[in-house]
Image (cartoon, helix red, strand yellow):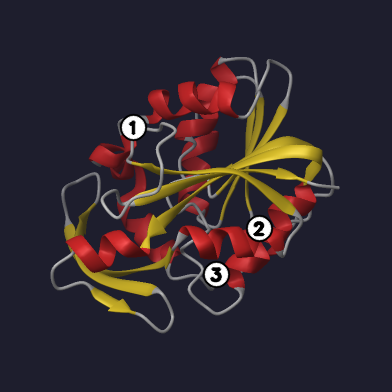
Amino acid sequence: MGAASRDHWFEDVADHLGSAYLRYSFTKGTRQEVDFLIPALGLEPGMRVLDVGCGPGRHAYVLAERGIRVHGIDVSRRFVDLANDGAPAGATFERLDARHLPFDSEFDAAICLCQGAFGLMTADGHDATVIAGIRRALRPAGRVALSAFNSYFVMKHWEGADFDPDTGVNHERTEIRNEAGEAVETSLWTGCYTPRELRLLCAAHDLAVDSISSVEPGAYRFEPPTADTAEFLLLATRQS
C-alpha cells in the first residue's frame, strides 16, 4: 500500500520530536486507555484493529501484548520507523495518509486517538474523509473509538487561544524539543468539535454513535460530555 506524499504540516513536527514524543505527559496513560477500550469495544485476542494516526505505536504495542492484531498507519515516516523498531508480535506499521485509507471491511475495530489524524486534518472535508475511510475499513458491526478536541473546553478554559469559531480550528504556537533537548517553535492546528457535530458526522457515514464521553489522557471513562475536559471520546458501530 502506497507511500504517503509529504504534504501534511504534522510531518515536520514529528521529524523533530522523534522518540521525544513519548516524554510528553499525555502519552503516559496509554495502558489505562487500552484497558478501558478493550471491553468498551468488545475486543478479544485474535481480532484485528486498525490504529489510525498511530504515532510511534504506543497503543498498538499494548493491544498486541494482549493478543490483539494491530495494523498502525501514520503520515510520519519518522514515527512509523520508530514503531517498527522493536514492535511486538502482532503489531505491524506502514506510512500511509489517513485521507487515503485503502482498506475494505478488513478490521473488527479501529482506533484514532489523541488527534491521531482526525482533528489534525484542518482543510474543510478532510476529517470527513478520514471518517469515511475508517468506516470502510471496518467489517459490518465493527467498532470505532475516536477522540476529538472539545470546542467548549477551548472557549471556556484556554485564555489567549487562537480559536476560529467559523472553522472550529484552534491554532497554537508552542515549543517542542527533540531527543537531544533542542527546541524549535512550531504551529499546531487542531480541529475542535461539539458532541452534536460528532453525531452528525457519524450519521453521514453510516456509523451509529454508542457513546460520547468527556475524557482526559490516561483517564478514559464513561462520563457525560462537559465543557471541562479537553477531549471527547466517541464510540460508534458500523451499521452495514
Residue pushed farthest front? 224
Q: Amino acid at mark 3?
A: Arg
Q: Amino acid at mark 2?
A: Cys
Q: Is residue 65 above or below residue 181?
A: above
Which residue in the protein does label 1 denote? 218
Closer to the chain start, of discs 3 and 2, is: 3
Element at label 2 = helix
On screen, residue 146 versus residue 23, left or right, reads right
First along the sequence among labels 2 and 1: 2
Q: Who's the residue at 42% across and 49% down the image?
A: 232
Callout 1: few (<14), some (14-19), or many (20+) C-alpha neighbours within 10 Å?
Answer: some
Quadrant of the rendered image containing residue 192: bottom left
Residue 218, placed above or below residue 207: above
Q: Secondary structure at mark 1?
A: loop
Depth check, front residue: 11 or 206: 206
Q: Nearer the viewer, residue 226 or 127?
A: 226
Q: Quadrant of residue 140?
A: top right
Separation (CA) of disc 3 from disc 2: 28 Å
Which of these two is toward me, 34 or 225? 225
Q: Position of residue 215 (x, y in %)?
A: 36, 41
Frontmost residue, 187 versus 95 = 187
Camera-nearest label, 3 or 2? 2
Q: What kind of element bears circle 3?
A: loop
The residues bearing labels 2 and 1 have C-alpha atoms spaced at a distance of 25 Å
- Which residue is located at x 41 percent, y 84 percent? 166
Whether residue 9 is visible:
yes
x, y percent for residue 98: 62, 59
Q: Which residue is mark 3?
A: 6
